Amino acid sequence: MKKLEATSLVLLHHHLKALRLPTITAECEKLARQAAADNADHLTYLLQLTELELLERERKAAERRLKAARFPTHKTLEGFDFAARPSVNKLLLCELARCEYIDRRENVLFVGNPGTGKTHLAIALAVAACAQGYRVRFFRLTELVTLLMEARDERSLLGLKARLAKLDLLVLDELGYVPASKIGAELLFDVISSAYERTSLIVTTNLPFESWTEVLGSERLTGATLDRLTHRCQIIETKGESYRLRDAKAKMRKGSAGEGAGSGGHREPRRRALEGGQRSS
Ligand code: ADP
Ligand code: MG
């Protein structure tokens, strides 16, 4: 095969740059040598180059989506110990990770005590959604309410709502830890209403539905919020004791087993202290 002259190569790089094809620019010469060695035809070479460019674009876009979602930590379903949480149906979670509920604009609600893996599962599903091209944003509920109130004061609420409306999936973590003010509750209700049948929501809460009135302030608002949230919704209960507590207890058992018979008297008060910790967390 005839070799491209150095000046033509400079021109080629210039054209590729103008066309915004950075991966092809970086790989074209190496791949050309490979194609020549393999006796590959021109179209095969072009196919390989365009595939590389597309793959790299998709990788970068996925990276951007993950960053834009602002997860507090990275969690996956693979990292979740389903055996330790039998109330959570692994098959259902794996099905949800395929994101068809987002196409159907359905919601997912995780309800359970602190430390039972609600946030972990919510992030894991949302990370899966990012990987599949959905636009996602994670908020701790108090953070979103603060943002909404600030935007309202600065008269930028419409802009914020427009940004939220562009999302495919909105994660609202920890509904119920801090009671929202009346205005906060109304702004939150507005977000949930606007999302209804347009954007999927994943909500985590440690509160049973009966207690939501305490957070949202009014029965009317609570009824209307629950109505929108739970219409076409998977409700997943993470029953049982805190995973952290379980971990701590297991470590302690290991520790005290090594301490010998003399330490037996300390076990009971320590256990009670831990159980007290679970209630207050
Ligand atoms: P919650 O949101 O219900 O309070 P988290 O999801 O924050 O609980 O879980 C607390 C910690 O325990 C996190 O670090 C989480 O990754 C971990 N965790 C909880 N449940 C499990 C589990 N079944 N398998 C693995 N890690 C878990
Ligand atoms: Mg949580």
Image: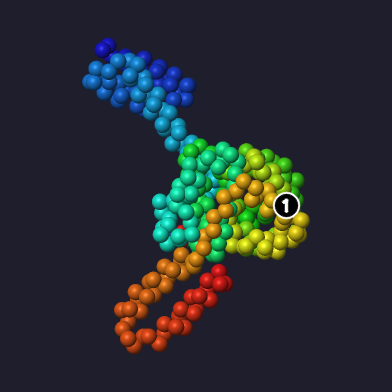
Q: What residue do we see at 57% from left, 50% from top? A: 234
Q: Position of residue 173 (x, y in %)?
A: 58, 55
Is 58 in front, or is 275?
Answer: 275
> In the image, 165: left or right of 154?
left
Instruction: From this view, report whether residue 222 is shown above or below residue 49.
Output: below
* Amino acid, disc 1: Ala
The colouring scheme, among rainbow, by chain, secondary structure or one colour, is rainbow
Q: Quadrant of the C terminus?
A: bottom right
SS at circle 1: helix
Q: Position of residue 177 (x, y in %)?
A: 62, 63
| Quadrant of the frame with the N terminus | top left
Image quadrant where residue 268 sits:
bottom left
Q: Residue at position x 26%, y 23% from top?
A: 34
For the question of whether residue 279 can be seen, the reply is yes
Residue of label 1: 224
Q: Is residue 172 above or below residue 26?
A: below
- Which one is in front, 200 or 133? 200
Q: Is residue 61 left or right of residue 204?
A: left
In the rendered image, residue 33, in percent from the top left (x then y), is placed at 27, 22
Q: Residue at x 47, y 25 (%)?
A: 20
Question: How many marks can you see?
Answer: 1
Mark 1 nearby-residue class (10 Å; few <14, some 14–19, many ≥20) = few
The location of residue 2, given as percent across then percent down, is: 27, 11
Answer yes or no: is residue 73 visible.
no
CB of mark 1 near ligand 2 (< 8 Å) = no
Which residue corresponds to the image point at 47% horizontal and 21% vertical from the top-left?
19
Residue found at the far top of this picture: 2
